[in-house]
Amino acid sequence: MPPPAIEAIHRDVTSRITYQHYAKTDFREITGKGQGNCSVIAYNMFLEAKREGYAPIIHTCLTPGYEGHQYTEVNGWALTIRLNKVIPMAQVNCVDYRKPYVGD
C-alpha cells in the first residue's frame, strides 16, 4: 500500500484537474480547478510532492501502444493519471525515452 501522504497528493491533484488529451509537454501549475493533459497533472503532482518535502521525478515514457505519457515518481511510487491510482514503480508499463525531470 502506498503511504497515505502520497495517495493524498494523487487524490488532490486528480480531483482538481480534469484530464484532457493533447500531445504537448505542458508544465504549468493549476492552483484551483482546471483541465490539462498528463504532463500538467504530473507537474502538479510534482509540485505538491516537493512542497511536502519529497524529491519527486517526472518520467516521460511510451505506453505499450506507443503513446507519449508523463507521470510522477515519489519514493518508489508512480502517481499516474493513466490508471488513476498510485502504483509501485515496478508495475509501470511504460518505457522511459527522455531524461527524467527533477526540477530547475
Image: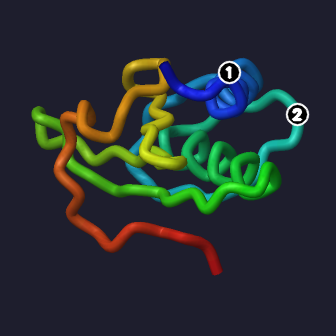
Please give the residue where the numbered disc 1 appears in the rendered image.
Answer: 11
The residue carrying pointer 2 sits among few (fewer than 14), some (14 to 19) or many (20 or more) residues within 10 Å by Cα, namely: few
Residue in the picture at 82% in, 28% down: 33
43 left or right of 37? right
Observer-nearest residue: 98 or 36? 98
17 left or right of 60? right
x then y, percent, for residue 93: 19, 35
Secondary structure of the residue carrying tag 2 is loop
Secondary structure of the residue carrying tag 1 is helix
Task: Tell me how far mark 2 sits from mark 1, CA to CA.
Answer: 14 Å
Occupied quadrant, residue 31: top right
x then y, percent, for residue 101: 48, 69
x then y, percent, for residue 23: 38, 47
Q: Nearer the viewer, mark 2 or mark 1?
A: 1
Observer-nearest residue: 11 or 54? 54
Give the residue type at disc 2. Gly
Q: Residue furthest bottom?
A: 104
Please give the residue where the numbered disc 2 appears in the rendered image.
Answer: 32
Occupied quadrant, residue 18: top right
Residue in the picture at 20% in, 47% down: 62
Q: If the image is split into quadrants, where does the C terminus sit?
A: bottom right
Observer-nearest residue: 14 or 56? 56
Q: As displayed, is residue 83 above or below residue 47?
A: above
27 left or right of 30? left
